[in-house]
């Protein structure tokens, strides 16, 4: 059975474009940038710019692969085609690790945001209610998912655009924000541009890479998209320029609107700015938007892992239940597996609420790095296959290949190495690497033994 069999092209151009935008704006920006500004200072904008360049090449590699063959299996199917079955198995499960822990981070963020309005309401219960909501949405239908994601993404875009306009205005006018004049001077007047030194900027790369996670979601949506050859290049290019504006531009304006010392990990920096402006309702509105942003990301995580796990289950590389489709053409088995892990994350948050977000994002970033590396390397193999005349290379191509491939892979390797020198919560991810490698190797061995056990039966099946 093909990995796309049973799906229906229920997503249109409007929804795919917004899914692409939604994937590029998540809790890593809305919440995580506050803590990173506190640790790195204004030079954090360099981390966003460098990681954004790597994300640009990843997206263009994805675009070339999607135009070669649109599939809901995305990089899992591409890894099987251009590297080998073992690579598909490893990348698929690492992507699942990414979204499982990203979902935990998103639920954690939602509970932090809601605390602004209901400080006495149990955070773990907030996370549980949010999980129940996105689970129901994903189980009902693909069309409902796409429609909800469209409006979630629209809210995020409007909020970011509103901040960019307000932030640019207060900077140009030199308006006092929280008693301090906004302006370019805030980039250097509180200890200098590298106020915390250069090492913290390097250490921030891991969490910044996590902030860019989910940009590849648009590739997974390709298998359920009408006219992917026309829709996908536009969607992918839209992600690229929005990275530059929404991420790098937003962080730069945050640093100029207020001194970097004003931000911290306990509140969205966007809410901090609007609160400092003395407009309470604006802060509440922004808080509502960042809640929807976190819900959107968690919603997307269940959607993508459901499709990836089904693609693997079809090949016998994931539990058989993950391969089941509902009457609404929804891979409910894979969605429920991921939801079960997110439920375990709610329990984790109950016991370590202060550390849950950092631990979850650190582990999730390993999955992001694996996914990005897989896409970049698969595009490199596609290019080689085209040079040998084995396949036809699409006209929508990764610029600078193969040199940009190797530069991007070197950057991702550097991020993994730097994890060993990060703070204790982020360092957990580095020590998870051998554990994950061993678990995936063992899983692949079990899959191989099952296939060998079935092979003799297949050989003796009457034809």
Image (cartoon, rainbow, N blue to C red):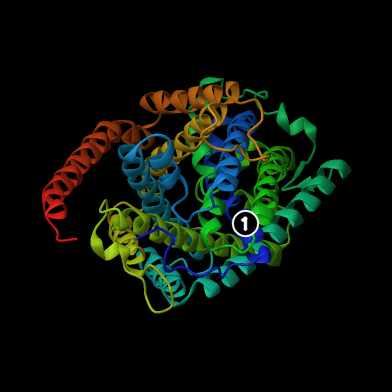
Give SS at disc 1.
helix
Number of numbered tags placed on the structure image: 1
Q: In this view, does 282 lie to the left or right of 120?
A: right
Residue under label 1: 228
Residue 146 at what x, y percent from top left? 57, 68
Residue 325 at what x, y percent from top left? 36, 71
Name the residue rendered at 49%, 60% in the picture: 300
Q: Which of 164 and 188 is in front in this view?
A: 164
Q: Pointer 1: residues within 10 angstroms few (<14), some, or many (20+)?
A: many
Tell me the quarter of the image containing the C terminus.
Answer: bottom left
**From what the image shows, is residue 106 above or below residue 325?**
above
Name the residue rendered at 88%, 44% in the picture: 173
Q: Which of 147 and 401 is in front in this view?
A: 401
**From what the image shows, is residue 281 above or below residue 179?**
below
Q: Is residue 27 visible?
A: no
Q: Is residue 450 left or right of residue 64?
A: left
Q: Can residue 442 be seen in this view?
A: yes
Residue 172 at what x, y percent from top left? 87, 42
Q: Which of 239 and 66 is in front in this view?
A: 66
Tell me the quarter of the image containing the N terminus.
Answer: bottom left
Name the residue rendered at 30%, 53% in the picture: 315
Residue 119 at what x, y percent from top left? 46, 66
**From what the image shows, is residue 30 above or below residue 365?**
below
């Amino acid at each position: 059975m093909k990995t796309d069999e049973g799906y229906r092209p229920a997503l249109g151009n409007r929804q795919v474009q917004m899914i692409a935008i939604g994937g590029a704006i998540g809790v890593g920006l809305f919440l995580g940038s506050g803590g990173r500004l506190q640790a790195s200072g204004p030079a954090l904008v360099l981390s966003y710019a460098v990681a954004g360049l790597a994300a640009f090449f990843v997206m263009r590699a994805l675009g070339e692969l999607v135009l070669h063959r649109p599939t809901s299996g995305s990089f899992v199917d591409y890894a099987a085609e251009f590297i080998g079955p073992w690579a598909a198995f490893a990348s698929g499960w690492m992507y699942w690790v990414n979204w499982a822990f990203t979902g935990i981070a998103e639920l954690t963020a939602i509970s932090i945001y809601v605390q602004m309005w209901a400080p006495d309401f149990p955070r773990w219960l907030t996370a549980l209610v949010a999980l129940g909501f996105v689970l129901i949405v994903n189980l009902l239908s693909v069309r409902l998912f796409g429609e909800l994601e469209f409006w979630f993404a629209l809210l995020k875009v409007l909020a970011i655009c509103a901040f960019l306009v307000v932030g640019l205005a207060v900077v140009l006018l030199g308006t006092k924000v929280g008693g301090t004049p906004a302006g370019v001077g805030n980039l250097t007047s509180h200890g200098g541009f590298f106020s915390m030194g250069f090492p913290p900027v390097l250490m921030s790369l891991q969490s910044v890479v996590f902030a860019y996670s989910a940009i590849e979601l648009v590739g997974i949506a390709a298998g359920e998209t009408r006219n992917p050859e026309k829709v996908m290049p536009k969607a992918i290019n839209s992600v690229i320029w929005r990275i530059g504006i929404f991420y790098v531009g937003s962080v730069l304006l945050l640093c100029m609107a207020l001194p970097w010392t004003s931000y911290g990990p306990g509140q969205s920096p966007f809410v901090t700015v609007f609160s400092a402006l003395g407009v309470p309702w604006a802060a509440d509105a922004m808080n509502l938007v960042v809640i929807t942003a976190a819900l959107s990301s968690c919603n997307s995580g269940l959607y993508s892992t459901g499709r990836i796990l089904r693609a693997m289950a079809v090949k016998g590389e994931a539990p058989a239940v993950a391969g089941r489709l509902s009457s609404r053409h929804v891979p409910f088995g894979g969605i429920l597996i991921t939801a079960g892990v997110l439920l375990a994350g709610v329990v984790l948050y109950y016991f370590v609420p202060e550390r849950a977000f950092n631990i979850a994002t650190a582990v999730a970033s390993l999955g992001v790095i694996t996914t990005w590396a897989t896409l970049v390397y698969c595009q490199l193999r596609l290019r080689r296959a085209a040079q040998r005349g084995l396949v036809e290379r699409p006209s929508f191509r990764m610029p600078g290949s193969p040199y940009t491939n190797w530069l991007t892979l070197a950057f991702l390797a550097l991020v993994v190495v730097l994890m060993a020198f990060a703070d204790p919560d982020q360092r957990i991810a580095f020590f998870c690497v051998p554990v994950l490698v061993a678990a995936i190797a063992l899983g692949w061995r079990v899959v191989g033994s099952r296939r060998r056990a079935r092979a003799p039966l297949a050989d003796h099946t009457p034809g």
